[in-house]
Amino acid sequence: MTSRRNMLKSAVLAGGAGIVGATALGSLGAEAAFGATSPQVEPGTPDPDFAEGRIRSIKGNTLLVLGSNMVFHNIRVVDGTSLWKLGPVSFEQAQPGDGLYARGVRMPDGVLAAESVWLNIVNIKGHIRNITSDKLHLDHNGKEILCHVVPGRSVAVHSDAPASSDLSSLRVSQHVQILGAWRPGTNEVDIATVFSPH
């Protein structure tokens, strides 16, 4: 982790090179977006190496993001940054209006040099109301979320079994957790993984 952080700092301070998605340094999986804060952060204080919000604009390799607390963040994507949008993607897949979580290294000028950027990622739990061949209707705290099955991408994980593209074992009224990509401005999600306890 330290060498990765040092490389990101060097890339930003040197002006950066080309922009890539998942890299030889290793892409962080989508599940990592919901991981713990940096170890040096005191409980209850903001993590300086983390940012969230919606992309307002993109200039060069920098994202201007308005956080949910109405604070603006400048997030720079450099060589070594991994980007996720239902799967590993290139920087060109980032669009104004996308929601994001980003983790990286805070530079002296306040810019966050991104180690990982997760675009439109959601992690929701609920009960299945209805199932069709290409959609799950999820009841999430009394609100319906329409979850789209993406051919070649969506998988189900049942208990401790390995991930499978076969979602036919899912049932109406079953409790599930869905990791996926939100379609901005809608109540719709593209499914990456459906986790089912049995």
Image (cartoon, grey):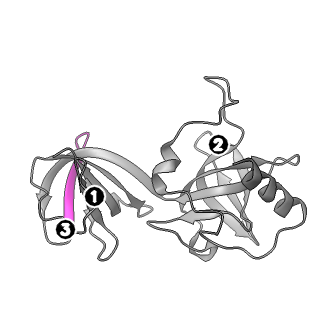
Earlier along the polypeptide chain: callout 2 or callout 1?
A: 2
Q: Position of residue 189 (x, y in %)?
A: 34, 61
Q: Are marks 3 and 2 in contact (CB under 8 Å)?
A: no
Q: Give whichever of 10, 93 is nearer the camera.
A: 10
On residue 70, the disc is: 2
- Residue 193 placement, left or right of 198: right
Q: Amino acid at mark 1?
A: Pro
Element on which disc 3 rests: loop
Give the SS element for disc 2.
loop
> What residue type is disc 3 on?
Asp
Q: Earlier in the sequence, mark 3 or mark 2?
A: 2
How much space separates mark 1 and mark 3, taking CA atoms?
Answer: 11 Å
Neighbourhood count class around disc 1 (C-alpha, 10 Å): few under 14, some 14–19, many 20 upward: few
**Residue at image coords 76%, 53%:** 3
Question: Which is more foreground, mark 1 or mark 3?
Answer: 1
Residue at 58% over, 64% down:
83
Pick the front one: 166 or 187? 166
Q: Residue at x 19, y 57 (%)?
A: 137
Q: Which residue bears the numbered disc 3?
A: 166
Label annotation for residue 162: 1
Q: Which mark is residue 15?
A: none
Does residue 69 lie above or below 111 as drawn?
above
State which region is magenta: 135-142
